Amino acid sequence: MTVRTDSAAPAPAASALDAAAIAAISDGLDEPQWLRELRAAWWQRAEATPWPTGQEEEWRRTSLDGLPRDARLVTQAATVRCALDTDLADAGVVFSDLRDAVRTHPELVERHLGRRETRPVHARSWAQAHAAWTAGTFLYVPRGVVVDRTLVARLQVTEPGAAWFPLTLVVADEGSDVSLLEEVTSPDGAPSWYGGVVDLVAAPSSRVRYAGLQRLGDGAWNIGAKRVEVGQDAEVTTLDAQVGSSVTKVGLDVRMSGKGGTSRLLGLLAAGGTQHIDLDSVQDLIASHTTSDLLYLSALYDEARAAFYGVTRVEREAKGTSSYQECRNLLLSPKAGAEPIPVLEIETNDILRCGHGATAGAIDPTQRFYAQSRGLSEDEAERMIVRGFFEQVVSQVRSETIRERVLTALAPRIGAEEEEAA
Amino acid sequence: MAIPNAALKQIPDSYKYGWHDPEMVPLNIMKKGLSAEVVEDISKFKGEPEWMTKLRLKAYRHFESRPTPTWGADLTPIDFQDIYYYAAPTNKAVQSWDDVPDYIRRTYDKLGIPEAEKKYLAGVGGQYDSEVVYHNIRSELEEQGVLFLGTDQALKEHPELFREYYGTVIPANDNKLAALNTAVWSGGSFIYVPKGVHVDLPLQAYFRINTESVGQFERTLIIADEGSSVHYVEGCTAPTYTSASLHSAVVEIIVKKGARVRYTTIQNWSHNVYNLVTKRAVAHEDAVMEWVDGNLGSRVTMKYPSIYLLGERAHGEVLSIAFAGDGQHQDAGGKIIHAAPNTTSLITSKSISKGTGRTSYRGLVKVYPGCEHSKSTVRCDALILSDEARSDTYPYMEIDEEDVTIGHEATVSKVGSEQLFYLMSRGLSEAEASAMIVNGFIEPIVKELPMEYAVEMNRLIQLQMEGAVG
């Protein structure tokens, strides 16, 4: 990424964003006219879309009252590191900071950027990021190209108390195959606002594995949205690993719009302190013979609280679909709390399989007793059981790079195999 | 209420309770619509004590101030000013069928109530529009101190007992529809079972709306004193009119230490009734409360029987069956609030949607901090019988205690073509085969019903299935 120097105008507070500030972002990045217009159009939409009031079903469990709206927009410092081997670049794979992709592959970016919308309850975050992004990841895999190693993008902001709205755009063209890990970090301390959105499109017959590892600082408000579109016969696996932040509210919007598509939606959540993690999802089975399975696991320590509101919707025209939604919560402290809410909305009778399950509870005392009778301390026993619980998700992650990074990020809470063995 | 509605024209002729008795002209009927004046008139007409009049008015103000709920079924067609809030067919409840006026007795004869009373029941109450017309209880129970009478009568005859419990489970400023009931309630059953008394046969009440555009707002209050037990059964029907009727009941149940109450409802209102009911029980130490809730009729039902487990080791169960045919929306479920340690609960829901029908399970399991060793299981199964039918599941869970075991499972399925094929190869018609599969699906709940209701339920399902296989 090239470092640009820029006029000395101070960055605006997130709450002070207006059309001029959006234009100033374009100026600072020396953007082409089409992108200026695109940002302006999305800003108009953002202004026309109020923030959720708390009355919406998806927003009843998280209030935006404490959102640090005065945090200053990061215009320069956020970095995105993407490494791409030359053989992949030669095959036409584009993987870079979105700002760079705009310059190196303008037509490709223009064709795909900002073309889609998400659900109305997350439309504001979506529009805001599309207008005010200053960092982001761009991945394009051409038709038929198989990327045989895991790509890793690291998004980082170094100043505390910042506001940033990174945009991730992943397009896997027909028959391609790719794994991407995106890791986002920010420093602890002053309240900050992370409003990242992810727009992932899996074209027919492609295979995409996308992992988002959230390691934001302890003052961060993570308010974002992810949209996944699964084309005909495509297969998408997402892993949502939530580790950091003070408050997280992210909406996942999965559209099974191509016949025969498959999605596997995995989540791991380890929260402690007073962390509040609230996720909502829609698995929208639009096309026939689609399959969508969701499995989210949380381990909740201290006074942490997790809410999960997940909707499986089977549309009238979608015949022969299979879906399952599962949310399991392990409560590891008397003050931890969970609200798993799995919702079904089924509009056809022609279904192969449809159901959901949700649980919340403490570690089974017999498991704990067994582990301790083998000589483990209480803490070690607990960590081992939690790791075993997470294994249901971890074992479904094929990429060793992703498994390793996610387990490392979780280790401060759940320990690691080697440690206990030592 | 807003009258013409395409959905109503589709009501099948198979609704066997759809007649109305043209001779039955209400003896007393208040003018249409609702106002503080109407609320006061009802209270005055009934000769109530002042505290009840005041409570009614307080509830009316709450009703006025609250918006109509929008989170569930579509209630916009209800015009609260186009309903008769009070219609009395007779002046007093009697204790022998011979004393019931002829035109009312004809209705109950058609429904088969007197016969059932002789055979299976410990006591029967019947309510026609707003007033209780019949109430009887076996004499041996009466001798043991069991009270089973119309709620209005209980207010007159047992004022202190009544006041001690009335409105303690569902206060006047509860939800909008419960407030409406508190403002205009009339009729319903009052049951008191003294300490240690077991009522072995079910007590039954039968609710019937007979007059067009009449709302029925019965109020039921059941108190099971320590170590007692009782099973109460209610059935509901109404004639098929082109304009809709409103049924908005409130049921309060107090299950004291070690007592046991089962409350069974077979709701079979005609398909023009809006059935918006608040049912809530509190269960004290070692008490057991069970709701068995069958919803077959009505155009729209919104009903979530709830249980507050207030004492240690209290147990609550909700068994719910919903069947939604063309134009119907059954939005039903259950709520369990764990507010004491070692409490346990079970919600089982079976729903079936057919034609353009829609069933929604909506439920809540809440565990307060400090309620350790609580266990709850929620199981919802839905069967969708046609292309245009719809099924939803909205199970809410709020868990604020670590040391608990809380689980929810749900499935949605259709009638399998292999199952149908197998049964039809044995000589059953498609309708018979489907009905058999549906009966098998709801069997875990039907077997909990009193015999005559189980038979009736199976027959109703059969009727619903005829000539309508998707």
Image (cartoon, coloured by chain):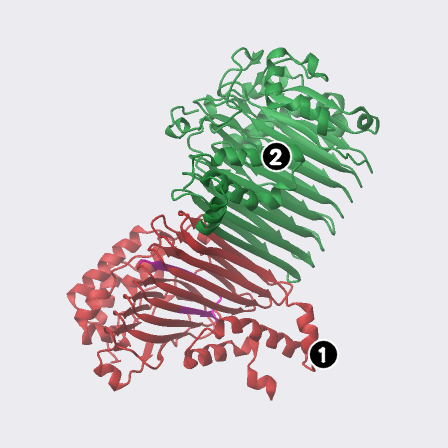
Chain colours: A red, B green
Mark 2 Cα-neighbour bin, 10 Å: few <14, some 14–19, many ≥20: few
When the figure is inspected, residue B388 is found, relative to residue B222, above or below; the finding is below
Mark 1 Cα-neighbour bin, 10 Å: few <14, some 14–19, many ≥20: few
Q: Residue at x 26, y 80 (%)?
A: A1
Per the image, the residue denoted by label 1 is A373
Is any part of residue B410 visible from this angle? yes
When the figure is inspected, residue B330 is found, relative to residue A142, above or below; the finding is above
* Quadrant in which the C terminus of chain A is drawn: bottom right
Query: Across the whole image, how many numbered discs are drawn on residues?
Result: 2
Instruction: Describe the element under mark 1 as helix, strand or loop.
Output: helix
Per the image, the residue denoted by label 2 is B455
Q: What stretch is highlighted in magenta?
A: A238-257
- Residue A391 x, y percent position in the rendering: 53, 74
Marks 1/2: CA–CA distance = 55 Å
Q: Does the magenta stretch include residue A253?
A: yes
- Of all chains, the one bearing label 2 is B
Q: Is residue B355 magenta?
A: no
Given the image, on which type of amino acid does mark 2 rest? Answer: Val
Give the side of residue A81 with respect to residue A407, left or right.
Answer: left
Given the image, on which type of amino acid does mark 1 rest? Answer: Ser
Give the side of residue A401 with respect to residue A385, left or right.
Answer: left
- Residue B203 x, y percent position in the rendering: 71, 30
